[in-house]
Image (tube, rainbow, N blue to C red):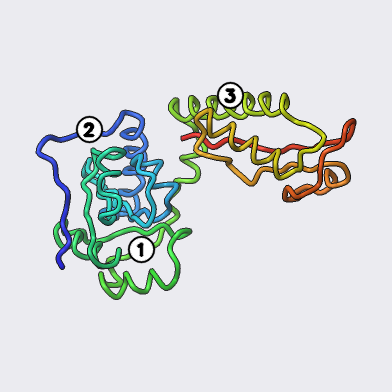
């Protein structure tokens, strides 16, 4: 079956913070003498488009304001909600097959790949389907770009900190000597969710007594003791 693109009659502009991120990236794409960058890292896709689904790719063009998202029918409505500014291509076959179809319509001569996020096997597949001369692996620079937080990210970081602190305060009021490390960790992650977090940003550590000497111990069945030591290491993931 043929794939299809989801196109909209009215152009939807990307939010200002995404527009600035894409503008910075497009300057680098042109420096590589490439026509576009294939973004395969889910974190970068979210950073550039706002789309948080998985099993999808993004294609950022060097000389066009449009961003193309290659996904499938499971995420069609989600893309419309999270990234209405993008041109969505709903694939019926594999991601690489849809990329070939998109490239035929766009006429790109050279596509850059994220060298740190493309396997050797995938690179060989793309070289076979698109042609070796049309593919180049680059250091995309996105990890350095993402390290400099924009206003939207600073707001999210502060909110994440507020959520994890309030969740901790709530749990401190509920800790009792009969509770296990696992139960306290579950309470903490529950409270973060209730307060609006996407989840924990890493595996929550709750270690009672002698377990507190282990830096990355997983919460277990050990119970906290009255007057004892409890080590808690936690964080909230927000936007």
Secondary structure type for disc 3 = helix
Say which of marks 2 and 1 sits in front.
2
Could you say which quadrant of the image residue 52 lies in?
A: top left
Q: Which mark is residue 136?
A: 1
> In this orientation, which residue lies closer to the viewer: 43 or 144?
43
Q: Residue at x 31, y 44 (%)?
A: 26
Q: Residue at x 16, y 53 (%)?
A: 5
Question: Marks 2 and 3, how far apart in space?
Answer: 31 Å
Mark 3 vs 1: CB contact within 8 A:
no
Question: Who comes first in sequence, dot 3 or dot 1?
Answer: 1
**Residue bearing mark 2:** 13
Q: Is residue 186 left or right of residue 35?
A: right
Give neighbour class at mark 3: few <14, some 14-19, many 20+ (Cα, 10 Å). Answer: some
Secondary structure type for disc 1 = strand
In the rendered image, the residue lying farthest to the left is 9
Could you say which quadrant of the image residue 99 lies in?
A: bottom left
Q: Which mark is residue 162?
A: 3
- Image position, residue 18 (x, y; %): 34, 35
Question: Marks 3 and 1, how far apart in space?
Answer: 43 Å
């Amino acid at each position: 079956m043929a794939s299809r693109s989801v196109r909209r009659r009215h152009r939807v502009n990307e939010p200002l913070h995404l527009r600035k991120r894409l503008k910075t990236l497009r300057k680098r794409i042109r420096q590589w003498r490439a026509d576009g960058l294939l973004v395969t890292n889910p974190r970068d896709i979210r950073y550039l488009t706002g789309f948080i689904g998985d099993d999808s790719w993004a294609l950022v063009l060097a000389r066009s304001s449009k961003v193309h998202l290659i996904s499938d029918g499971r995420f069609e409505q989600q893309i419309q909600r999270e990234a209405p500014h993008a041109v969505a291509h709903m694939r019926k076959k594999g991601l690489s097959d849809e990329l070939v179809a998109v490239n035929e319509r766009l006429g790109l001569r050279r596509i850059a790949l994220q060298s740190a996020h493309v396997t050797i096997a995938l690179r060989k597949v793309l070289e076979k389907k698109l042609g070796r001369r049309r593919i180049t692996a680059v250091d995309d620079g996105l990890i350095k770009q993402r390290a400099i937080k924009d206003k939207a990210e600073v707001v999210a970081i502060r909110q994440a900190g507020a959520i994890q602190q309030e969740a901790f305060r709530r749990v401190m009021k509920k800790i009792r000597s009969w509770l296990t490390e696992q139960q306290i960790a579950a309470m903490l992650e529950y409270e973060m969710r209730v307060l609006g977090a996407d989840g924990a940003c890493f595996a929550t550590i709750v270690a009672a007594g002698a377990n507190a000497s282990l830096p990355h111990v997983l919460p277990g069945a050990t119970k906290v003791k009255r007057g004892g030591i409890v080590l808690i290491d936690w964080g909230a993931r927000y936007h």
